[in-house]
Amino acid sequence: MYLTRRKPALYLREDSRSGLFLGILPRKCSIFKLFLTCLVLGFLSMLWLQLSCTGDVRKQEDALPKQSCPPVPRTVNEDPSWGPHRLALLVPFRERFEELLSFVPHMHQYLSEKKVRHHIFVINQVDHYRFNRAALINVGFLESGNDTDYIAMHDVDLLPLNLNLNYGFPEKGPFHVASPELHPLYHYKTYVGGILLLTKQHYELCNGMSNRFWGWGREDDEFYRRIKGAGLQLFRPTGISTGYQTFRHIHDPAWRKRDQKRIAAQKQEQFKVDREGGVHSVLYRVDSRTELTIGGAPCTVLNVLLECDLNETPWCAFS
């Protein structure tokens, strides 16, 4: 005896087959028509959303204050009538491009307004040793050419604001523009960092700067002793009433931490006077020399590879 399983019969009322499916679409509606209907509904929803959001954005834009773009410095060509002397602005540099973008246009405009003939040299350290500001200044001095007769040892994060500051030829002796009475950070009497002007003859007389200072700090304190040892008188600005507002310091220590480590015997060596090394003992190679214009201001970028004797200054390498 065999049992067979019968499929249950489907009983549909005639009016249900011709009725609405879910109250919206006919039950006999094809898949294509269903897809087309969904597409149209989706498009209408997006269009409504776009129109409503556009109104909100316009309201927000109207509420925001109008901000004008910063002015682009006008390009100024130096005039020989400004005087017989020409300044080599030496900027020791590594990886602080956001500061350089502000520095070069500002300094070109500032010195042009003061009618100081000048050329900006960015000495960019591209080797793998620790930063050596003094050695880079020595390189900049040697590579600045014969068309400049005095130099400015200039930090990239310090912008002069007072046009009464003197950037002229320091014939009588080194001129410390960023004097302790005006610098926003460093106020001790023997400080000669930040911005210092010297004739090339006086820089030679000091034998340049020591190449032994790897990492941040102390190289300008040693150079102060060289100035005194060469019998030169140090001059500073007078009659400047803007105080610590004379300069704008654009370095952010939270973003750009300085390398202040003291490795091996470096702690003891940093207070000594280097009586042998100087401008003509610096070891380096210029990897490239590029003429650039930043914000309408011309400058020369020297990519420099410094060399280090690990036996003499083992603290030049990162540990």
Image: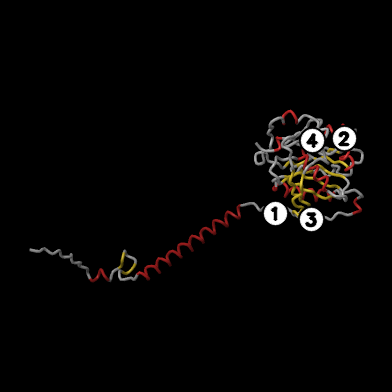
Q: Are marks 3 and 4 in contact (CB under 8 Å)?
A: no
* Badge 1 element: loop
Q: Residues within 10 Å of mark 2 (few under 14, many from 20)?
A: some
Q: Which residue is mark 2?
A: 234
Q: Residues within 10 Å of mark 4 (few under 14, many from 20)?
A: many
**What whole-number distance in Å separates the C-alpha atoms at marks 3 and 4?**
34 Å
Q: Which residue is mark 1?
A: 69
Position of residue 298 measured from the top left corner of the image (x, y, whole percent)? 79, 54
47, 266: nearer the viewer: 266
Identify the amino acid type marked 4. Asp
**What whole-number distance in Å separates the C-alpha atoms at marks 2 and 1?**
42 Å
Residue depicted at x 51% and y 61%: 50
Q: Earlier in the sequence, mark 3 or mark 2?
A: 3
Q: Are marks 1 and 4 in contact (CB under 8 Å)?
A: no
Q: Horizontal placement of 316 versus 55: left or right?
A: right
Q: Which residue is mark 3?
A: 74
Q: Earlier in the sequence, mark 1 or mark 4?
A: 1
Identify the amino acid type marked 3. Arg
Q: Which residue is mark 4?
A: 220
**What whole-number distance in Å separates the C-alpha atoms at marks 4 and 2?**
13 Å
263, 290: nearer the viewer: 263
The residue most toward the front is 311
Position of residue 163 measured from the top left corner of the image (x, y, whole percent)? 83, 45
Residue depicted at x 84% and y 56%: 77
* Badge 2 element: loop
